[in-house]
C-alpha cells in the first residue's frame, strides 16, 4: 500500500463518528468562537456534554486534505497604528487581555 492510500484509509477511520454521541458547538466569548462539545447518550436515556478535544477531524463539515486542515482565522488584522503601538510596548484597550 502506498503512502497516499494509507493516509486515505487512516483519515477515513478518524473521521468516523464516536458511538452514541454527536459533535456540537457552544458559542464562546465572541460570536465567531465556537467551543466543541460532544453530546454523549447514556444508557439510562440521559445525555451528558463534554469538551471535545478531537479537533476538526470528527466534524463532518470540516474540509481536511493531506496537507491542510481548513480552520477559520479568528484574529482581526492589525492596523498600522496597532502594530506601531505593539512595537513601542504601548498597552491600550484593543491590545489588553479581553479587549
Image: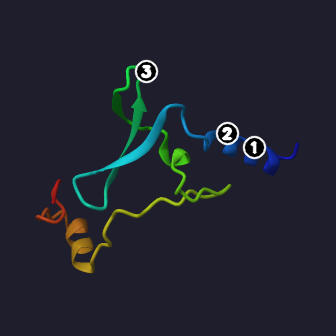
Q: CA distance from mark 2 to mark 3?
A: 25 Å
Question: Is 77 rendered above or below residue 51?
Answer: below
Position in image of residue 50 (x %, y %): 36, 33
**Residue at the disc numbered 3:** 43
- Circle 3 packing at 10 Å, graded few (<14), some (14-19), many (20+), is few
Marks 1/3 in contact by CB < 8 Å: the verdict is no
Q: Which quarter of the rendering shows the C terminus? A: bottom left
Of the residues under marks 1 and 3, which one precedes in the sequence?
Answer: 1
Residue at point 60%, 58% (across, down): 68
Q: Secondary structure at mark 3?
A: loop
Position in image of residue 57 (x %, y %): 55, 46
On residue 23, the disc is none
| Lateral position of residue 31 relative to residue 14, left or right | left
Quarter holding residue 32? bottom left
**Residue at the disc numbered 1:** 9
Position in image of residue 41 (x %, y %): 42, 30
Residue placed furthest toward the front: 45
Q: CA distance from mark 1 to mark 3?
A: 31 Å
Marks 1/2 in contact by CB < 8 Å: the verdict is yes
Q: Secondary structure at mark 1?
A: helix
**Residue at the disc numbered 2:** 13
Marks 2/3 in contact by CB < 8 Å: the verdict is no
Residue at point 27%, 77% (across, down): 79
Quarter holding residue 73? bottom left
Amino acid at each position: 500500500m502506498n503512502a497516499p492510500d494509507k493516509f486515505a484509509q487512516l483519515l477515513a477511520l478518524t473521521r468516523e463518528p464516536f458511538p452514541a454521541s454527536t459533535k456540537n458547538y457552544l458559542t464562546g466569548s465572541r460570536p465567531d468562537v465556537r467551543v466543541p462539545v460532544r453530546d454523549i447518550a447514556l444508557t439510562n436515556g440521559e445525555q451528558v456534554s463534554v469538551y471535545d478535544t478531537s479537533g476538526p477531524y470528527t466534524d463532518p463539515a470540516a474540509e481536511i486534505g493531506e496537507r491542510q486542515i481548513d480552520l477559520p482565522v479568528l484574529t482581526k488584522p492589525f492596523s498600522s497604528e496597532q502594530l506601531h503601538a505593539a512595537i513601542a510596548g504601548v498597552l491600550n484597550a484593543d491590545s489588553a487581555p479581553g479587549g
